[in-house]
Image (tube, grey):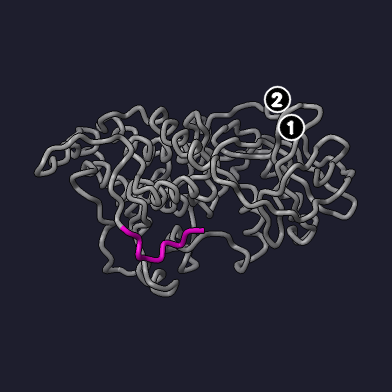
């Protein structure tokens, strides 16, 4: 045991660490269930006001009732001002690890599984983008700004969850040098330092869906500078898909999400999800979540047999804390994002022709079959060797 918090939470293993944070797997003696504990150093918050705003936003995230967001239901502060976030432990695998394993095996996710991930994470982001303060009615739009495979967790039941929302919000307030994000998933406006709205998260999600489909990110360069130049290039081409593997409607959906100009993307996550639902209807074998569950189980059976390195760094010892926020997930009141006021960005006019084409199904002609017909395996597909800077972490 690495430590004990409030004589209740046993820290059993260190899962990761950074400059301001340590993440532990723990066991709740009272709830008799595994939990996740995040330890934040006092330097993580700039001042008392920053901590209060963090707690205010955090409570709204919990109240949203969105199970696609991995959040902590208890926030506690030790005498030395360290903050402990205690919440759900997701038993599964990160999308980053799954993609790396499949690429090494020469395999890739199916379109149905990719769309399931896009739909589940898109729904979680749509909820975050429409948070409302229950006390004041004020809209508290929470951009994630770090949507990437490392922050997406997958379970054996085919559930996809997005983590890190509350952490990235606090890091943003620390200033530009502390803003999160992996370069390959950053929107052009993020790189330029321009105004951001929910379409920046949409761009990142589009990059993730493209990578799930193809095992590589849509834009690349030999160096970080070259990668930035490619992302920002006004003459860049749309990401290239294998037309024999992916219907035109699916290609159009992803290419639109990663457009250079935010105005050329879907106006928001809700419109993206509506288009995605239409695309999914026309994808053969669309039992998206079941297909994703099959791939996750397949991967877990293989990776579980590989010994993982252990970090023997000591834990915080025995800690007694003051409870700042304690909201068991079973007592939260779900609040559907659809009932909340729409931001201005969702009301922007959208070009009619592409949407009408999506609705009519005109873009969903089946891909041309290969010259030599052969039996297609549902998960095993060829993967091009990766020779480009992908920005993976």
Q: Can you give x and y, in whole percent of width and height, for residue 73 in the image?
A: 71, 36
Placement of 35 over or under 308, stated as above or below: above
Give yes or no for contact between labels 2 and 1 (Cβ–Cβ under 8 Å). Answer: yes
- Whether residue 389 appears in magenta in the rendering, the answer is yes
Q: Determine whether, in the image, residue 235 is placed left or right of residue 165.
A: left
Q: Residue at x 41, y 61 (%)?
A: 390
Query: Which element carries disc 1, helix, strand or loop?
Result: loop
Of residues 302 and 251, which is closer to you in this image?
302
The N terminus lies in quadrant: top right
In the figure, residue 18 lies in which quadrant? bottom right
Q: Tell me the number on the disc at residue 327.
A: 1
Mostly what secondary structure, the magenta segment? loop
- Whether residue 318 appears in magenta in the rendering, the answer is no
Q: Can you give x and y, in whole percent of width and height, for residue 321 in the image?
A: 87, 44
Q: Residue at x 53, y 54 (%)?
A: 146
Q: Residue at x 66, y 53 (%)?
A: 16
For the magenta stretch, what is the residue range?
385-393
Q: Can you give x and y, in whole percent of width and height, for residue 223 in the image?
A: 42, 73
**Residue at the spot of label 2:** 331
Q: Determine whether, in the image, residue 73 is placed left or right of residue 108.
A: right
């Amino acid at each position: 045991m690495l430590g004990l918090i409030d004589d209740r939470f046993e820290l059993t293993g260190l899962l990761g660490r950074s400059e301001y944070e340590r993440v532990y797997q723990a066991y709740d003696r009272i709830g008799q269930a595994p939990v996740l504990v995040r330890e934040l150093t006092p330097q993580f918050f700039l001042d008392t006001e920053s901590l209060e705003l963090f707690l205010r936003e955090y409570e709204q995230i919990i109240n949203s009732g969105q199970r696609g967001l991995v959040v902590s239901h208890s926030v506690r502060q030790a005498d030395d001002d360290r903050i402990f976030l205690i919440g759900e432990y997701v038993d599964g695998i990160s999308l980053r690890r799954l993609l790396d394993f499949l690429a090494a095996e020469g395999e890739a996710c199916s379109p149905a599984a990719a769309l399931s991930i896009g739909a589940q994470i898109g729904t979680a982001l749509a909820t975050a983008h429409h948070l409302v303060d229950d006390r004041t009615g004020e809209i508290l739009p929470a951009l994630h700004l770090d949507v990437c495979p490392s922050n997406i967790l997958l379970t054996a039941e085919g559930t996809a969850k997005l983590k890190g929302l509350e952490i990235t919000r606090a890091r943003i307030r620390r200033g530009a040098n502390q803003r999160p994000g992996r370069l390959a998933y950053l929107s052009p406006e993020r790189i330029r330092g321009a105004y951001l709205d929910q379409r920046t998260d949409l761009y990142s999600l589009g990059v993730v869906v493209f990578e799930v489909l193809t095992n590589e990110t849509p834009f690349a360069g030999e160096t970080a500078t070259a990668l930035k130049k490619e992302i920002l290039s006004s003459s860049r081409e749309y990401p290239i898909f294998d037309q024999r593997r992916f219907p035109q409607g699916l290609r159009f959906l992803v290419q639109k999400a990663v457009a250079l100009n935010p105005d050329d993307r879907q106006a928001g996550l809700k419109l993206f999800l509506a288009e995605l639902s239409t695309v999914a209807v026309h994808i053969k074998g669309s039992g998206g979540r079941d297909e994703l569950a099959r791939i996750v189980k397949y991967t877990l059976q293989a990776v579980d047999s590989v010994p993982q390195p252990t970090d023997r760094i000591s834990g915080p010892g025995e800690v007694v804390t003051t409870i700042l926020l304690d909201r068991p997930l079973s007592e939260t009141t779900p609040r559907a994002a659809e009932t909340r006021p729409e931001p201005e960005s969702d009301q922007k006019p959208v070009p009619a022709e592409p949407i009408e084409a999506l609705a009519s199904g005109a873009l969903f002609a089946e891909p041309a079959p290969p010259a030599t017909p052969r039996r297609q395996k549902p998960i095993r597909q060829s993967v091009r060797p990766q020779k480009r800077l992908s920005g993976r972490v």
